[in-house]
Amino acid sequence: MKVTTRKWDASEYLDSPEMIHEYLKASFAEGDSDQLLIAIGNVAKAQGMSEIARKTHLSRQNLYKALTPGSAPKFETVKKVVEALGCKLAVV
């Protein structure tokens, strides 16, 4: 019997506000900016990249570029995306 596998996709499991919140919180706590960008990108994918693009007034292509590990998106871009995801940035 042949076993097939596929790459694990976190966005398939981000189906509730609580799950999204905990995922982003854990990613932020890691302190790795690339990991945080990946997490924000996964949440955007889970909610629909086209919808996030519409809410942020950015193109889907620019969103994918900005949320790629190693990229250096502007703070304004990250802020727009986080807010479009229904979250807020805060210093506590």
Image (cartoon, helix red, strand yellow):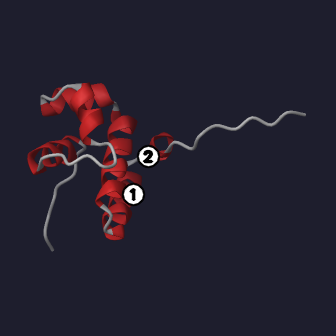
Check the image and report above or below for 62 versus 75: above
Q: Which residue is mark 1?
A: 23
Rendered-image quadrant of the C terminus: bottom left
Identify the amino acid type marked 2: Leu
Marks 1 and 2: CB-CB under 8 Å?
Answer: yes
Identify the amino acid type marked 1: Tyr
- Residue in the image at 24% along x and 40% along y: 66
| Horizontal arrangement in the rendering, residue 55 relative to residue 21 (left or right) | left
Check the image and report above or below for 65 versus 76: above
Q: Residue furthest left?
A: 76
- Residue in the image at 18% along x and 47% along y: 78
| Nearest the eye: 41 or 66 | 66
- Mark 1 vs mark 2, CA separation in Å: 8 Å
- In percent of width and height, residue 31 lies at 31, 68
- In percent of width and height, residue 74 lies at 12, 47
Q: Residue furthest bottom?
A: 92
| Horizontal arrangement in the rendering, residue 11 relative to residue 49 (left or right) | right
- In percent of width and height, residue 28 lies at 30, 64
Q: Residue furthest right?
A: 1
Point out which mark residue 14 bears.
Answer: 2
Q: Quadrant of residue 5?
A: top right
| Horizontal arrangement in the rendering, residue 53 relative to residue 31 (left or right) | left
Rendered-image quadrant of the N terminus: top right
| Nearest the eye: 91 or 36 | 36
**Crowding near pointer 2: few (<14 within 10 Å), some, many (20+)?**
many
Mark 2 residue element: loop
